Amino acid sequence: MADTEILLESGTNEIEIMQFTVYGELYGINVAKVREIMMADHVKPVPHSHEAVEGIFKPRDILLTVIDLPKYLTGRESEKKTRDLFIITNFNKTHIAFRVHSVVGISRISWKDIQKPDKTITYGEEGVATGIAQCDDKLVTILDFEKIVVDIAPETGIQMSEINALGNRNRRESRIILAEDSILLTRMIKEALIKAGYDNIVAFNNGQEAWDYLESIREDEDFDQKVSLIITDIEMPKMDGHRLTKLVKEDSIMKKTPLIIFSSLINTEMMIKGKQLGADEQLSKPEIGHLVEVMDTLLERKGI
């Protein structure tokens, strides 16, 4: 794909959702996370693994962990059928297979058409549904696959040990704008950054809220003090991180503000998209220690 074609696909605030079913219920996953779809195959069990981990298999060159999504979602043993499918995913620099019952198709919609589940749906700090999308005449529950993996293997999430490894650090007054829709990740990122010396963090639930705030202070003489650096996720309801990046970097006042895309979706294609849109850096979750080091560098380069 040519760079110009990739640019046309960037910053449009749209998402392609692959719809699939588990026990007849309709769920969705961002197509950007999907590597391929395969017929379910024999899986080798792994002793003492999480109850939702079905085992491992090696279809070609990569050894894959298989997560039994029906069991994870319902808590009951699922009947393995010959028509089941494996959705092979790639995010957080990891390949994982998820068993599902069928794949329905792909819909392209705007992030504005994705609603964040309210507290009657989510459980605890955050549920497994990251959004509810209207695809044609059907409601599709978009699952938080990163949270599913962290629930099963906590060591794959943000690790405070990475911040501890940075040693003693000075406190900074730099004001950090964070756009992240996950309640859990927002809390974990803020805790890590505060521990690393960044006390002044203003968090927003999505790109639209962050952009509204940036626009509201755009004309302020002390804009640089109110916004030292921006960190944004990519996948967010209402406005995604690519659209936010495009708007910031096309603005005559905001464009000099360092902007970091911090997302589980960072791969070669996404790196090209982010670079075309003007992102200063792009980092893969959950590399929180690397994020702090990059923040240090960008702010020092800016003289803060």
Image (cartoon, grey):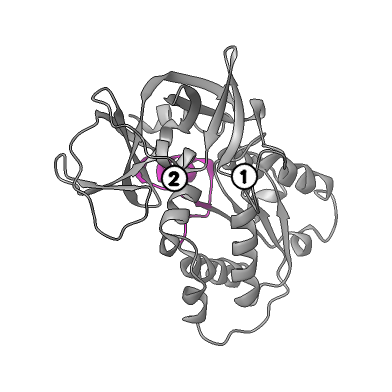
For label 2, the SS is: loop
User: Mark 1: few, some, or many residues within 10 Å (few <14, many ≥20)?
Assistant: many
First to last magenta residue range: 262-286
Residue in the picture at 29% in, 61% down = 48
Q: Position of residue 215 (x, y in %)?
A: 79, 44
Decide: is 127 above or below 170: above
Q: Position of residue 2 (x, y in %)?
A: 35, 30
Residue in the picture at 52% in, 29% down = 15
Foreground: 161 or 291? Answer: 161
In the image, is residue 124 part of the stretch drawn in magenta? Answer: no
Q: Are marks 2 and 1 in contact (CB under 8 Å)?
A: no
- Residue furthest to the top in view is 137
Relative placement, left or right, of 1 versus 126 is left
Q: Amino acid at mark 2?
A: Leu
Decide: is 172 above or below 146: below
For marks 2 and 1 on the same chain, the one whose residue lies earlier in the sequence: 1
Residue in the picture at 67% in, 37% down = 117
Decide: is 226 above or below 168: above
Relative placement, left or right, of 159 versus 230 is left
Q: Position of residue 24 (x, y in %)?
A: 46, 21
Residue in the picture at 46% in, 67% down = 290
Q: Position of residue 263 (x, y in %)?
A: 50, 50
Q: In the rendering, which numbered label is found on residue 265?
A: 2
User: Mark 2: few, some, or many residues within 10 Å (few <14, many ≥20)?
Assistant: many
